[in-house]
Image (cartoon, rainbow, N blue to C red):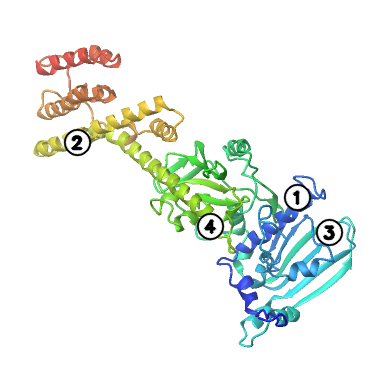
Amino acid sequence: MSNTESVTVGGKILDNIALSMYKEAKVIFREYIQNATDAIDDAVKDGVLAEGDGEINITIDKDARRITIEDNGIGISSLDFKSTLLGIGNSDKKLANNRGYRGIGRFCGLGYCKTLIFTSTRKGGTKLSTMTFDAEKLRIMTESDKKYTAEIILNATVTFSETATDTDEHFFKVELIDVTNDELLKVTLEKDEDPSKIETVRDYLSFVAPVEYRNTFSHREKIYKYAAELGVKITEYKIFINGEQLAKNYKDNFTTKNGADKIFDVAFKTFRDDENNLIAWSWIGLSQFKGVIQKTKANPNHMRCIRLRSGNIQIGDENVFQSRKLFTEDRGTTYFVGEVHAVDTKLKPNSQRDYFANNDTLKLFEEKLKKYFAELHDLYHYASDSRSAFKAKIQPEVFMLKIESHTPAYQATHRAEHDAALDNLLKKATEAETFIDKARQDFNNNPAAIAAQVFKEIEADAPTLEDTNIFYPPPPCCHCNIGQQKLNSFTKIFMKSFSRTRNSKARSSLTRLTRCLPNEPPRPVNRTQLQKQIHSRQFDEARDVFSAGVQR
């Protein structure tokens, strides 16, 4: 191309950067918020604002179909106003310091309103600058078969004005007039709307925006402390929606497909390169991992999944790691609540901010994430195995209690079947005891280990016979046939418990056994002595007393 030839920028570029770039309408709030946070940071750096005094106010008027997003950041001077806002991709923001560094995010509102207005001034200035886009006309021109250049479209759809202003003012305001997308106007749900299917702007921003953790989240101080120890600052801003301050809506309690669960602690992880430089860090909530955290009408669980953040603004959505196939199972991330904070500036958000641009740092980051997520996969499976072990431990006695609820005739005709089932349950109970004993030993050896903490939480909540809600029939007569059958079955439980594990299974089965052991002939057993010996762990003596009584 010769030096005299000019470059023509087609109007379709406006469609690409403003109308077609984002998959979800609510993303425009994220774009304007990240620009606002950059402006606040600049104001603090220049001494215009004190640290912590920056604010972003979002006003959504559903009836008027109007959205306003205003910050008290550095603002734009009248001299730079036109060139800054009409320049495409020529932002002077630096990647290491700014979140909205590409210089195209400000156009995102053009696709969702009829009129888009930017208003700003900078401290020390005397003019208030306003730029108005006829967004409806702009869309018509970009979609036209006629090949308009970007310059022609902007000249036809943009107007500019200035008015006098107070020299102390500094702000930037975005206004969307006649909003065309109902999703952007939904701050609260209607009475019959399902929160698991409809996400409000507040719900969306409570996990996307760079705001503080909810003050009722028990573990937030521990997260702040860990970040400080790493030398990392979690940048947070005061963001208000219709006057109400926004916070990350993490909670201690949540529901899974298998019932209620609770975050009892948080665990941390760092990701470093070969030179020990910090790439990212993360926290996850520790729970019993009872199952997939589901979205329901009663509890939409908006906080579920491990979120990816850069500059404390969310990258992508809750499925960002699932979409990259970094978890062993696709459902894996839905067992967890947590965040991964990218720190290395070489992890560059792409233009849509739904992930990072490909480079060597990203490749290394994903390798480390995949290894860590494999550990998390093992963790929630270990939690499942632990719960199963505690259930299996009591199943022989649960089974016998269920058998007792049947008639003597039924029990007599199904005796062989019941004996076989009982043998199988006893085998599984023994395996469960072995698992539990090892887990307890692992906890004693390293109580700080994540798996050990999860196990102890599960053990404290382990089911007992009383939790089964099985009807306890009155003690049977040991002189009748059914009493003898029960005695034989409970004897099998009792003796196998002693011979294999010598633990609480034998002690708990004593209660069932004493229903079948009379104090008078023909089978006298000193139940008081037996009970004392068992609870004092004199197992051999207890076994001898029991054997002498039932075999006489």
List the residue tagged with mark 4. Answer: 359
**Other residues around mark 1 within 10 Å, as few (<14) / some (14–19) / many (≥20):** many
Distance between the alpha carbons at the discs numbered 1 and 3: 15 Å
- Give, as a three-letter code, the residue at label 1: Gly
**Other residues around mark 3 within 10 Å, as few (<14) / some (14–19) / many (≥20):** many
List the residue tagged with mark 2. Answer: 403
* Mark earlier in primary sequence (2, 3): 3
Distance between the alpha carbons at the discs numbered 2 and 3: 82 Å
Q: Are marks 1 and 3 in contact (CB under 8 Å)?
A: no
Direction from residue 418 to residue 160 in the image, left or right: right
Point out residue 379 in the picture as x, y percentages from the top left corner: 40, 41
Q: Nearer the viewer, mark 4 or mark 2?
A: 4
Q: Are marks 4 and 2 in contact (CB under 8 Å)?
A: no
Comparing 333 with 230, the one in front is 230
Q: From this viewpoint, is residue 180 visible?
A: no
Element at label 3:
loop
Point out residue 522 in the picture as x, y percentages from the top left corner: 10, 16
- Give, as a three-letter code, the residue at label 4: Asn
* Mark earlier in primary sequence (2, 1): 1
**Other residues around mark 2 within 10 Å, as few (<14) / some (14–19) / many (≥20):** some
Quarter of the rendering occupied by the N terminus: bottom right
List the residue tagged with mark 1. Answer: 54
Direction from residue 490 to residue 77 in the image, left or right: right
* Mark earlier in primary sequence (1, 4): 1
Farthest front residue in view: 2
Q: Nearer the viewer, mark 3 or mark 4?
A: 4
Q: Nearer the viewer, mark 2 or mark 3?
A: 3
Comparing 209 with 8, the one in front is 8
Point out residue 459 in the picture as x, y percentages from the top left corner: 38, 31
List the residue tagged with mark 3. Answer: 122
Point out residue 101 in the picture as x, y percentages from the top left corner: 67, 60
161, above or below 237, in the image: below
